Image (cartoon, rainbow, N blue to C red):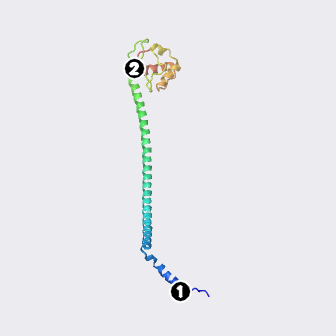
Amino acid sequence: MNPQPDFERLADVFVGAGEELRKLPNVPVINQGQNILTAITTMQARMDTQFDALGARVGRLEARFDRLEARFDGLEARFDGLEARFDGLQGQFNGLQLQQSAESQNQLARLFNSHVTSPTHDFEPLRNAQNQVPRGFPRNGTALASMTSANLARLLTSYGLQPQEEVEGKRRQLRHFIGVVYQV
């Protein structure tokens, strides 16, 4: 008969191998590998915590920047409103300057016209609110005497006056307005 396996001896070998395998964690290389793995896991957990905290801080900063941007947008809108108001005021001021300039020139023209003594002497034309001489302003007393009712009405209206009904009333109204004191 051929040699047969010794099961008892085989069992002792496996028990001994098992006991030796249980001692493997005590081997420095394997033990240090486990320590390194534990250290890496701990560092990763700390980094995750720090990244989460950093992400939260960045989120808060973004929210603050969004609030600042909204405030700047509000300020920009207010400045645009102020600029529009300033432009409006500047336009009004320019209009007042124009009217003031026209009124100053008109005062001088009325003074000049008050010294006209003949229907052939030229009038100094008056300016309207836009600081322009309206079309059809009479050159002198003779031209004023020959103006039609419609032309007189248009000229009086261009100066912001309400024309009278009668043509002679319109002539008197225009003569008085431009400062002529003699009778044409």
Q: Quadrant of the N terminus?
A: bottom right
Of 154 and 130, nearer the camera is 130
Q: Residue at x 48, y 24 (%)?
A: 158
Instruction: Find out whether the residues at labels 1 and 2 contact each other: C-beta distance under 8 Å.
Output: no
Q: Is residue 9 above or below residue 95?
A: below
* Image quarter of the C terminus: top left
Q: Residue flagged by tag 1: what amino acid is it?
A: Arg
Spatial separation of the CA atoms under disc 1 and disc 2: 142 Å
Position in image of residue 29 (x %, y %): 43, 72
Image quadrant in which you'd find residue 31: bottom left
Name the secondary structure under disc 1.
Answer: helix
Q: Report the residue at 39% width, 28% height from top.
A: 100
- Binning the other alpha carbons within 10 Å of mark 2 as few (below 14), some (14 to 19) or many (20 upward) gives some
Residue 84 or residue 75, whichever sits in front: 75
Rendered view: 22 above or below 49: below
Task: Single out the residue that lies furthest toward the right.
Answer: 1
The residue to which callout 2 is attached is 109
Q: Position of residue 182 (x, y in %)?
A: 41, 15
Does residue 41 sit above or below 147 in this rendering?
Answer: below
Q: Which mark is nearer the camera, 1 or 2?
A: 1
Instruction: Work out whether residue 15 or residue 40 is closer to the camera in this orientation and state it.
Output: 15
Residue corresponding to mark 1: 9
Residue lying at 51% horizontally and 85% vertically, measured from the top left = 12
Decide which of tag 1 and tag 2 comes sooner along the chain. 1
> Which three-letter amino acid code belongs to the residue tagged 2?
Ala
- Residues packed near mark 1 inside 10 Å, few (<14), some (14 to 19) or many (20 plus): few
Q: Secondary structure at mark 2?
A: helix
Identify the residue at image location x=44%, y=47%.
73
